[in-house]
Image: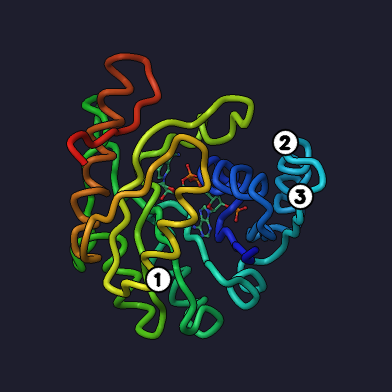
Amino acid sequence: MARLAFIGGTGPEGTGLAIRFAKSGHAIYIGSRSEERAAETVAKIHEASPGADLYGGPNLDGALKADFVFVTVPASAHAELLKELEEAIADKIVVDTVVPMSFEGDDGPVAAMPEAGSAAEEAASLLPNAKVVSAFHHLDAKQLQRIDRPMQGDVIVCGDDKAAKQKVMALVDEINYVRALDGGALKNSRFTEQLTVLLVHINKIYQAHTGIRVTGV
Ligand SMILES: NC(=O)c1ccc[n+]([C@@H]2O[C@H](COP(=O)([O-])OP(=O)(O)OC[C@H]3O[C@@H](n4cnc5c(N)ncnc54)[C@H](OP(=O)(O)O)[C@@H]3O)[C@@H](O)[C@H]2O)c1
């Protein structure tokens, strides 16, 4: 079993993924800027997965101790936080889930891609020693948290380090009914990140929590 840290794990995305991976027996660390919020989230996950191996505390401690460092913060916090954590993360596997988007007027979100091309590529440029893999953009956080219900959908995983990508794909496949698909190089993350913006629009139109399923493979 691996040690998984969630940077910004108190939000819906980090909490949802942590709940699912606590169920499969991994040691989970919830990172936060606040010890209190981390403790509250640990208690919530404990309720969903009694007996799970759970810890919480500062983001830095999670980045130091984990085998997999999940980045589950808003895009606005992404670059600054990664700069702060670079030394602690070192050459670990970083799983970037971040979707850069902004809300302008009543028309819903628009993609707001960083100069690097995508959040994942930004992470790779800020963490030159880490093995950055991008994944989980198309699993809805609310659904992830509903452990009583099976999660559905494909998770497209992009990364340049093949061994790290395989390890992340193996984690994805631990979630019942969810399938990992190899999306190729890290630079393809710009497509997976932007697709989420479209899903948010579809969610709004249909009042739904959508995901994706790729056919023919
Ligand atoms: N929600 C979804 O369905 C979904 C699906 C796919 C991907 N994602 C991506 O996953 C990421 C997290 O989503 P979310 O909905 O969980 O986000 P969120 O609730 O807005 O933020 C997650 C956590 O990030 C921390 N945070 C916020 N601002 C910060 C700052 N300036 N500096 C450091 N930490 C900060 C907060 O934790 P503390 O206050 O405890 O430090 C917060 O609880 C996003 O990038 C999103 O695009 C979300």
Identify whether 120 is placed above or below 171.
below
Q: Disc 2 designates what residue?
A: 48
Report the quarter where the C terminus lies. top left
Report the quarter where the N terminus lies. bottom right
Three-letter code, disc 1: Ala
Does the beta carbon of the residue at mark 2 sit less than 8 Å from ligand 1? no
Q: Earlier in the sequence, mark 2 or mark 1?
A: 2
Residue 82 drawn at (x, y percent): 45, 71
Which mark, by number, is residue 53? none
Residue 17 drawn at (x, y percent): 55, 46
Q: Secondary structure at mark 3?
A: loop
What is the distance, in whole Å, between disc 3 and disc 1 at their CAs?
A: 25 Å
Q: Residue at x 30, y 60 (%)?
A: 119
Residue 69 drawn at (x, y percent): 52, 66
Tell me, yes or no, whether the two marked residues, 3 and 1, touch with CB atoms within 8 Å: no
Q: Disc 1 designates what residue?
A: 164
The residue nearer to you, when weighing 135 against 121, is: 135
Which mark, by number, is residue 52? 3
Q: Quadrant of residue 104?
A: top left
Three-letter code, disc 3: Ala
Task: Indicate left or right for 185 with 53 as reference.
Answer: left
Q: How is the image coloured?
A: rainbow
Identify whether 194 is placed above or below 124.
above
Three-letter code, disc 2: Ala
Q: Residue at x 24, y 57 (%)?
A: 189
What is the distance, in whole Å, between disc 2 and disc 3 at their CAs?
A: 9 Å
Q: Residue at x 52, y 42 (%)?
A: 175
Task: Indicate left or right for 19 with 138 as reference.
Answer: right
